[in-house]
Amino acid sequence: MQVQSMHFKARSGQKLADQRLQANLRKLSTKWVAGRAAAIAELDDFEATRDDAVQRRSRALANLDIWLERFEQEATRRGTTVLWAETPAEASKLVVAIAKRHQVRKVTKSKSMVSEEMALNRALEAAGIQPVETDLGEYILQINNNEPPSHIVAPVLHKDKDEVSDLFAKVHQKPRLTEVNEMTREAREVLRPHFLSADMGVSGGNFVIAETGSVALFTNEGNEGMCTIVPRVHVAVTGIEKVLPTLEDLAMVARLLPRSATGQSISNYFSILTGTRAAGELDGPEHHYVILVDGGRSGLIGGDFEAMLRCIRCGACMNHCPVYQKVGGHAYGWVYPGPMGSVLTPAYVGVEKTLDLPQAATLCGECHVVCPMKIPLPDLLRKLRERQFERGLRPLGERLGLAAWGFLARRPSLYRLSTRAASQVLRWYAGARAHLRHVPGAGAWTEHRDLPAPRGKPFSVQWAQRKSAAKSPR
């Protein structure tokens, strides 16, 4: 997936005008937000659980190199081959090399955001190997001209049932179905032969466990099992930050991930994959690989943005974000959308290539409130904005405007005088109208928002009068 984050403004404008998309995005508040609230209410002490999980993730990151080495040792001891990739492109080359080594012709894939970073499907196809997405949402996107996902948990959130129905009828060359259960059965019938004929399966890894050398996966469709234990070769790709020291750590984080992601107490399927098929076992891969991808992650260690490495990819921040709720994931232009993407994408690909993303937030703080790992996303977005400003990456008009505001803010008397003058001008501009639209110099804000016209006296004047009245003898 190519980085197109420089086009956020143009893309978001298109998404705001897409009425069908707007209707589909309303599912976030009616289903996902309410579902999370109900699921966390089941816990006796959600905050204590969250604090414990945050501490465990932070301890793992504090000694990341040690736990990664321990994972490699334990995984190798159990028959897994552990490989390291500095970049996503290098990771793709490793997967292709593994496929060629084992004469693979077809690869079934379980949903993996790291494989999106790697542009893995494109690399496999270029090598003459057929990739088949088996997560229902990812499968829908693949047959729709390899459309990128719009959400890290629900990749096809932006489409409604009728769109999928039309797509299935076109691609499958079968009568159009309209019932969800019939459509999912049709997809299962199409995918089942691929599961049984694939030479290799590729999955992500929600976490890797150092003490056992295992890969942990949370899924809801069961396709993950068909990708990991049916083919003779299984490759798991995941980021280096996903290591947890013990199974106890995994159990604690597992109490938060499905609740934050989909509003479930537990995922439908939970797998701990350890090594290759042992003697006497009926299933499991003959060859097992784990590729640990850096892709910019190590650059965050010890810096201002290290907290982002705690992210467990639940998607809660985007589900509650007022910006994401209105524009969807494709506007962000890369793998990770929403508040977490507005921090991760600049961190991974460079702040100069993602000028709009740190600005793509209201800084309302909701993302921080709902994040199970307590990542201070608003603070990190502010730091990115500061870096852009310091490096002169923001438009000249914006920098001059902020400089002027800073000048006035340090001089209270002049600030009050200026705001009173501005209030008078806006009152004159509004006339008899109750709201302002298309205000000169603020068109981007007022094109889609109603700004109340100033009425009455400025707050500073009212406050001064109230203090004066309070001091007057009665």
Image (tube, grey):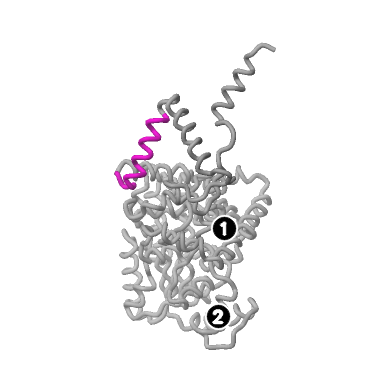
Q: Amino acid at mark 2?
A: Asp
Q: Amino acid at mark 1?
A: Ala
Count of marks placed on residues:
2
Mark 1 vs mark 2, CA separation in Å: 28 Å
**As rendered, which of 427 and 104 lies closer to the eye?**
427
Q: Please state the horizontal and vertical placement of residue 342, each as a whole percent of the image.
A: 43, 52
Q: Which of the two labelled residues, at mark 1 and mark 2, occupies the earlier sequence position?
A: 2
Give the magenta-colored segment's residue range. Answer: 392-409
Residue receiving disc 1: 261
> Is residue 394 within the magenta segment?
yes
**As rendered, which of 165 and 197 lies closer to the eye?**
165
Q: Is residue 25 left or right of residue 385?
A: right
Query: Does residue 168 show up?
Result: yes
Residue receiving disc 2: 166
Quadrant of the snapshot with the N terminus: bottom left
**As rendered, which of 359 and 16 lies closer to the eye?**
16
Which class describes the residues within 10 Å of circle 2: few (<14), some (14-19), or many (20+)? Answer: some
Q: Please state the horizontal and vertical placement of residue 145, each as a whole percent of the image.
A: 43, 76
